[in-house]
Image (tube, rainbow, N blue to C red):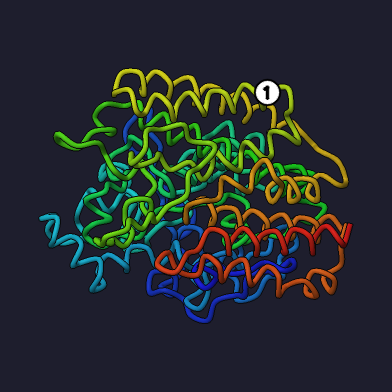
Amino acid sequence: MRRMLGALAALILLAGGLLLSPVLAAGNPGPAAVSNGPVGQTAFVGVATCAGSVCHGRSEGNGAVVRQDELLRWQDPSSKGGAHSRAYAALAGKRGQQIAATLGLGNATGAPACLGCHATDAPAQLRAPVFHLSDGVGCESCHGAAGGWLPSHYTVFGTHKANVSLGLTPLENPQVRAGVCLDCHLGSSKPGHFVTHRMMAAGHPRIAFELDLFSTLQQHHDEDADYQARKGRSDSVRLWAVGQAEAVRRSLSLYAVPALANDGVFPQFSFYDCHSCHRRIFDQAERSLTFETNPGRPIPFGMPPYNDENMILLSAVARVLAPAQAAQFDAAARNFHSAMGSGRAPAQAAANKLAASAGVLSGVLAKSGGGADTAFTVVATIAGKATSPRFTDYAGSAQAVMAVDTLLNALVKQGRITVGAAAGIRGHIERAYAAVGSPNSYDPPAFRAALGEAARAIGALR
């Protein structure tokens, strides 16, 4: 888990890349390459259109307004920051081809079920001449099709507000950013944006997401005075909290869609906690229970639980930043788990109510500034007596250690603790990561103890 996600002890700007991809090395075709597409639709202009040396394709970040080495960061072959540019190539790899073959999808690089998230899968009639699927998850996957806003974007007197009005995605808005990221990092009802249990059984990794951590890993800009003047100053605690709320809302909204919630005669198991079922089985004279009862899940004994990793963390932050709504959310969560044991119809109705409650929390958290000690308080709450007993399964525990890590990073960004102080307690965070290093060796009591130690170490810096 630690190797997969990386650790954020301090503010770390992702290193610049070493090589230009073939499409970028070919040069920048410039604004003339922009195609308007059919009337009323906006063209996807492709990564190469953004790659000029006077735009985002410099070899070093020394631009006057923006860094201008954004493309190098996006395609960095040595870091997680380049993961989006490598997404399409992953389909052509051995694992990608094996998954596609197992599922009967044909070549993975042409499979609609894969391209929705492994590339900017724009409609063919909206692709400009230099647009290439092989560029992977390109600029326009996150920033929106640029045919409409590109001319305003590079104009000297252009404004961010004008760009947004022409179709640029306002990613500085936590709810908007979460929505864009969750399309692939959790799923959506769009074609090619949902990882089913069959896909995971064939070898696709389990889906996991945390908005602030993943945003930091992908960050390709500096939040200097100019950025803050145009888009405001970001707040890591707010971004993390809204990410949890939007993940809950998205998951439950998808579950409530009959076509996604069911797979043949079986439930769509991707909504459930994977490792609650995928555990060792013992057959002996005396039983060996391989799970712990979870106080947040009033479900019948032996029933697989819904994956509630984000629900647990949202409940914790709500008690700190939105106490007026926290009790309602907790009650809706318990009702949902209980309804899961009563049948499809009541579970769907309860899912809709819980999704609505998460949406309310998302709106409140998006406007909440918190205080100087908010991150400290949330860390203590996550590891506290009301929340810690709910960490009985691998997925929720992995989400918890990501939360503690990203909140520690937030404290460094806020200047509440120094980089040196954060590094001094790094060992505690590492032990918490090690406790979720593998689902096969996961031990709930050991994890809760490690998480508690990490939280106390952070609290000592308050």
- Does residue 65 sit above or below 296 in this rendering? below
User: In the rendered view, does 227 fall on the left or right side of 69?
Assistant: right
Residue neighbourhood size for the residue with mark 1, other residues' Cα within 10 Å, grouped as few (<14), some (14–19), many (≥20)? some
Taking depth in this image into account, of 310 and 165 the one nearest to the observer is 310
Q: Residue drawn 48% across and 38% down? A: 148
Count of picture labels: 1
The residue located at (68%, 70%) in the rendering is 61
Q: Which residue lies furthest to the bottom in this view?
A: 18
* Residue type beneath disc 1: Gln
Residue 154 on image: x %, y %: 61, 50
Placement of 24 over or under 106, stated as above or below = below
List x then y, in percent, for residue 380.
Answer: 76, 49
Q: Position of residue 288 (x, y in %)?
A: 36, 58
Circle 1 residue: 325
Q: Quadrant of residue 455?
A: bottom right
Image quarter (top left, top right, bottom left or bottom right) of the C terminus: bottom right
Q: Is mark 1 on a helix, strand or loop?
A: helix
Viewer-proximal residue among 86 and 320: 320
Residue 323 relative to residue 396: left or right: right
Looking at the image, residue 53 lies above or below residue 123: below
Answer left or right for 422 relative to 356.
right
Examine the rendering and report whether any part of residue 193 can be seen. Answer: no
Which residue is drawn at the image coordinates 41% and 32% (left, top)? 299
Is 390 above or below relative to 201? above
Give percent across and percent down for residue 337: 44, 30
From this viewpoint, is residue 289 visible?
A: yes
Q: Which residue lies furthest to the front in this view?
A: 285
Q: In which quarter of the image is residue 85?
A: bottom left
